[in-house]
């Protein structure tokens, strides 16, 4: 599989923003350590409704599902956040959507 850009969305459950941020802060370093993503810099932004928008480039996405370290992060994320689709964001309904940069 060729590298692919992915847009991952995480909408924190009420009162779980700090927990989610801690997991997001582990996500890219873990994927990079396991060589699952490219060296392209990842972006993290936030929509008006509080959803985090993480953009990165997979080397090969299928391999991520085989790693227990990644599974641990993803399972924990599902406990503190919803994983909405891009069309759920108000910004996605406009051309050239803008998001608040986080890092």
Image: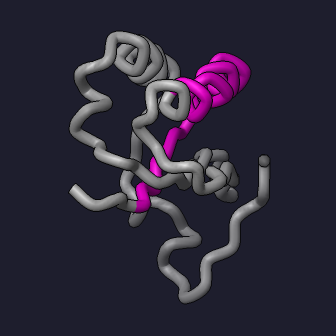
Query: Is 35 left, or right, of 48 in this rendering?
Result: left
Q: Is residue 78 above or below residue 99?
A: above
Query: Is 48 left, or right, of 102 in this rendering?
Result: left
Residue 71: % across, % down: 35, 17
Question: Which residue range is magenta in the image?
Answer: 5-30
Residue ID at (47%, 22%): 77
> In this orientation, which residue lies closer to the viewer: 30 or 100?
30
Residue ID at (40%, 49%): 58
Q: Quadrant location of the N terminus? A: bottom left
Residue 24: % across, % down: 61, 30
> In this orientation, which residue lies closer to the viewer: 69 or 18?
69
Residue 37 part of the magenta-drawn span: no
Give the number of callouts: 0
When asked about the image quadrant of residue 22, the answer is: top right
- Colour pattern: one colour
Q: Is residue 70 above or below residue 87?
A: above
Q: Is residue 90 visible?
A: yes
> In this orientation, which residue lies closer to the viewer: 33 or 46?
33
Residue 12: % across, % down: 57, 31
Q: Is residue 13 visible?
A: no
Residue ID at (61%, 45%): 52
């Amino acid at each position: 599989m060729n590298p692919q850009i992915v847009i991952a969305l995480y909408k924190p459950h009420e009162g779980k923003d700090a927990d989610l941020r801690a997991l997001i802060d582990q996500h890219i370093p873990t994927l990079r350590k396991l060589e699952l993503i490219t060296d392209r810099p990842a972006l993290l932004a936030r929509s008006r409704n509080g959803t985090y928008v993480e953009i990165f480039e997979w080397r090969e996405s299928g391999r991520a599902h085989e790693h227990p370290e990644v599974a641990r992060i993803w399972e924990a994320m599902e406990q503190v956040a919803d994983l909405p689709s891009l069309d759920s964001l108000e910004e996605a309904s406009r051309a050239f959507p803008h998001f608040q940069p986080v890092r």
